[in-house]
Amino acid sequence: MTASSIGKICAAVIGCGRMGAVTSDAMRRFAPAAWMPLSHAEAVVTQPSLELVGVCDIEPGLLASAVARFGVPGYADYHELLDNLRPELVTVATRTPERPDIISAAVAAGVRALHLEKPLCNSVAQLTQLEALLATPSLACTFGTLRRYMPIYRRALELAGGAEFGGLNQVQVNMGKAPLMWTHPHSIDLLLFFAGDRRVKSVSAHFAESSVERQGSRLDGDPVVVSVLFEFDDGLTGLIGQTGGCDVILAGSNGTITVESDGRRLRMRSSEGDDAYWDRLCVEEADGDPGGTRLALDRLVDGLNGNTNQVLADKRAILTGQRLLLACGQSHLAGGAAVDPNELDPDLVITGRSGNRYA
């Protein structure tokens, strides 16, 4: 067993690929500063309360690279890592099919905090098991849907709650022509973030037929989303389509708020007095401060130090978001009909497969 420095929380990373340990060159070049540090290991070593004590990957090259870069023990078997290092905090950046078993093993090993990449799982049966497993109030969880932690999105939420906005009527998330399991956990989490305590009462989804193969209650592939409509209990609607730009548009009775280009800036349009046209424009640029995965880990550290309200809310959002993701698949199987996300087919599976790789 490896002990951490005095007062620090032992942390380990399982999965040493693009999100686990190696931020892609494209993300470094194009993403706003708020997305860095992005990889789990990079974020752990910048968090002053954490100490990275080990990494794990089944691919020898990725594991060797991470061990050399971060100077910590490496394991090919996550069970050995959990047994030998006994980390309090674990991040999981594997492909989805392995993730439920890793989560189960981590909880059984006494891990108190988890940062998980998305999606959470591939089936309703797995989700049911994870809902029970993650119900423990003392277990803190955050997710790879990082926008909810970034200041500019939190600023948009604050503005949307202001009286002059006139109440939130619609949230539209523009992630382009993108696959459900790979991309749209981000979209769904943004909808839940801005919706707050509202409950989704129905989901209507359409996929590109050529992107997924139906085998009974099993969808093999990572279906490309054509459109999804989420209807909330108070009349709020959430929309996902094929428009690109990585923008989020909040529509109120008196204007719109747009977080543009993955958080580069916020643009608010409203009217002057009785003018029916929303020609008044206010633009706020992102502050440029780093954040990324580090913001999620900060939240976990707060939870381990007793500030549990926010991490409990995050955990609810993780589980609800996964349920809504699967509800999209159920709606597609029903020809796009509206479905209740709380009444899912227990045999429903979405493999998330693209070629030989999985989301």
Image (cartoon, rainbow, N blue to C red):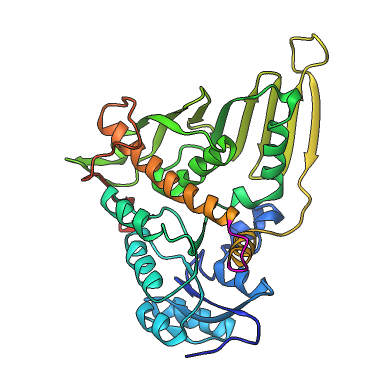
Q: Provide residue 285's location: percent of width, then percent of height.
A: 78, 43
**Figure quadrant of residue 53:** bottom right
Q: Where is residue 140 in the image (x, y as percent from the top left)?
A: 51, 62
User: Is 135 within the magenta?
Assistant: no
What residue appears at the point 66 percent right and 61 percent down from the top-left corner?
Answer: 36
Camera-side residue: 318 or 240? 318
Q: Residue at x 75, y 17 (%)?
A: 278
Residue 323 lies left or right of residue 292; in this view the side is left
Main secondary structure of the magenta stretch = loop
Work out whether residue 318 can be spotted: yes
| Count of marks placed on residues | 0
Quarter of the C terminus within the rendering:
bottom left
Left or right of 149 on screen, residue 347? left
Residue at the extreme left: 216
> Where does the image place residue 356, in percent across and percent down from the top left?
30, 58
Q: Please give left or right for residue 205 compared with residue 28 in the image.
A: left
**Residue for point 40% across, 40% down:** 324
Q: In this view, does 59 lie above or below 187?
A: below
Residue 236, image x and y in percent? 53, 25
**Residue 306 colored magenta?**
yes
- Asked if residue 283 lies left or right of residue 309, the reply is right
Q: In the rendered image, is residue 354 in sight?
A: no
The residues colored magenta run 304-308
Residue 245, quarter of the rendered image: top right
Q: Which residue is drawn at 65% across and 56% down?
A: 35
